[in-house]
Amino acid sequence: MIRFFNVTKSYARTGTAVHDVSLHVGKGEFVFLTGPSGAGKTTLLKMVYMEERPTSGEVQVSGTSSLDATARDVARLRRKLGIVFQDFRLLENRTAEQNVAFALEVTGAARATIGPKVARVLTQVGLASKGTAYPKELSGGEQQRVAIARALVNDPFVLLADEPTGNLDDRATRGIFQLLREINAAGTAIMMATHNLELIRRQELRTIEMNRGGIVFDSAAQRRVVREV
Amino acid sequence: MRSLRDAFVTFRRTPLLSALSVTTIAFSLFAFGLFGLVALNIREALDRLEDRVELRAFVAEGTPTESIAIAAADIATFPEVLSARTVTQDQALARARRELGEFRDVFEGAVLPASIDIRLKPGFRDPATVKSVAARVNTFAFVDDIRYGEEWIQKLYRLRTIAGIAGLVLGLAFASVSVIIIGATIRMAVLSRAREISIMRLVGATDSYIRRPFLLEGFAKGVMGGLLALLLTWLARLLIDRYIIETVFFDERIASLGLLFGAMIGLIGSAVSVGRHLRTV
Ligand SMILES: Nc1ncnc2c1ncn2[C@@H]1O[C@H](COP(=O)(O)OP(=O)(O)OP(=O)(O)O)[C@@H](O)[C@H]1O
Ligand SMILES: [Mg+2]
């Protein structure tokens, strides 16, 4: 589903951001991506949604290869992905509903199908009653729920979340994390970059730790190693 | 539909620049239009004049009528020549009297020279051909002098060429200015919507979808500029008609060609700009 083959990403001005990473994330998995600042987590996620292409190596996501994907292929791919950021990235001049509907409109969804889908995902993230609120009328946690609803509305096979709780207090963080678990339980894979070690420690979920662009620990690999022994 | 609404949204966001782009497109087309109108009317006039283009070869006194007739028949076989008619001294006098009506007394006792009046076939009435025919007619020894509307026909031709070139140069200059201004407007619009565009990309909108409202905006401005130019040209013609000289106006085909050209300017300006700036947001 998501595969990295010896992926290296270098920038002209800052050098190597990701170094020789090989990785496989399967259907329905929940993966934590952790590591110190500058480790390459964001860069790795960007290569999953092909905002960036590897300098060497190959990324394959759901049949799309970084080696030969056209701009149109990338647009198609993203309709099957959900992407969530620390800073929510909502449009301030649109209501919660309109923000979610936006993702359907710009991908050419049939008009009649938009309303019901939006209502469904807003209910799923617990914001059924706040559909007509503007982002500035919502708390941080609620705004992130709108962003998650927008990410979910195209029924993605994986949700990519780059520090989705970075701007939230503990309570809101737990709420968002709980929501992500529910979404995962319903079958959507999740890759979540986070600095919140406490959150990770309490879970029995796959954890990939990065440092200086490389993977220094992968709990899935550990388990596999243990099994082989 | 959404694109159409968006096009007008950007118009509201940057009203000054948008109005400026429409105006420059209008001026570009107005320059084409005005000089085009001049060229068109000069051509009309030339067409009418050319019908009358005539060479008149005056014959020396005492030339035998038979020689004149033979020469006329010879001239009539020139490929450019429609007809060559001999006019005797008496006929010349009669014609002068007829044409000058009340001044006929002036011709009392006067002698006008005989001539061969030559008319050219259509398509052979431009100054160069007229001149070459005149030169050949002049080789007959008894031909004293040849008159043809030489100077002012050439002047009209030159005027038409100048009007055409001036319209083209001015129009193209304005057109490139409008492309630049449209480009700047689109750039502003793209930047002011950078956030929206990046989110569109994130959720999987194609570049052509993102580009569409901007292209539509350029196109709409081009058409508006074209309409404005048409109106300006039409008003200008109205004034010229009333105060200077009666003129003809473009037919619908040329008018819609103007609109199309305006739309092209708008489209090209926005296409170039949006292509360049979408990469940067
Ligand atoms: N667009 C870019 N251009 C140049 N260098 C970049 C770019 N993006 C990231 N980098 C560099 O790549 C390295 C990894 O950055 P990245 O954002 O992936 O780290 P991160 O693990 O997400 O860090 P954080 O936890 O602070 O978000 C950094 O050294 C950064 O300077
Ligand atoms: Mg990061």
Image (spheres, helix red, strand yellow):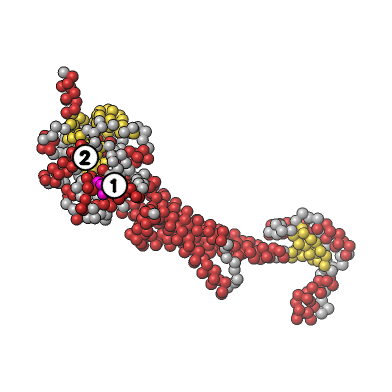
Q: Amino acid at mark 1?
A: Lys
- Per the rendered image, the range of residues in magenta is A116-121
Q: Which residue is mark 1?
A: A117
The one nearer the camera, B137 or A57, is: A57
Quarter holding the N terminus of chain B is bottom left
Q: Which mark is residue A183?
A: 2
x then y, percent, for residue B167? 53, 60
Helix, strand, or loop for circle 2? helix
Q: Is residue B251 left or right of residue A191?
A: right
Specify few, some or many for label 2: CA neighbours under 10 Å numbering under 14, 14-19, or 20 or more.
many
Q: Amino acid at mark 2?
A: Ile
Instruction: Give yes or no for residue A119 being in the magenta stretch.
Output: yes
Judging from the image, mark 1 belongs to the subunit labelled: A
Dot 1 falls on a residue whose secondary structure is helix
Q: Is residue B40 visible?
A: yes
Crowding at mark 1 (Cα within 10 Å: few <14, some 14-19, many 20+): some
Q: Chain of mark 2?
A: A
Q: Is residue A130 left or right of residue B38?
A: left
Measured as percent of width and height from the top left, residue B190 is found at 34, 52
Residue nearer the viewer, A81 or B235: A81
- In the image, residue A220 lies at what x, y percent? 19, 27
Give the mark nearest the N terminus, 1 or 2.
1
Residue drawn at point x = 28 percent, y = 52 percent = A98
Q: In this view of the protein, which residue sits in the foreground, A42 or A200?
A: A200
Q: CA distance from mark 1 to mark 2?
A: 16 Å
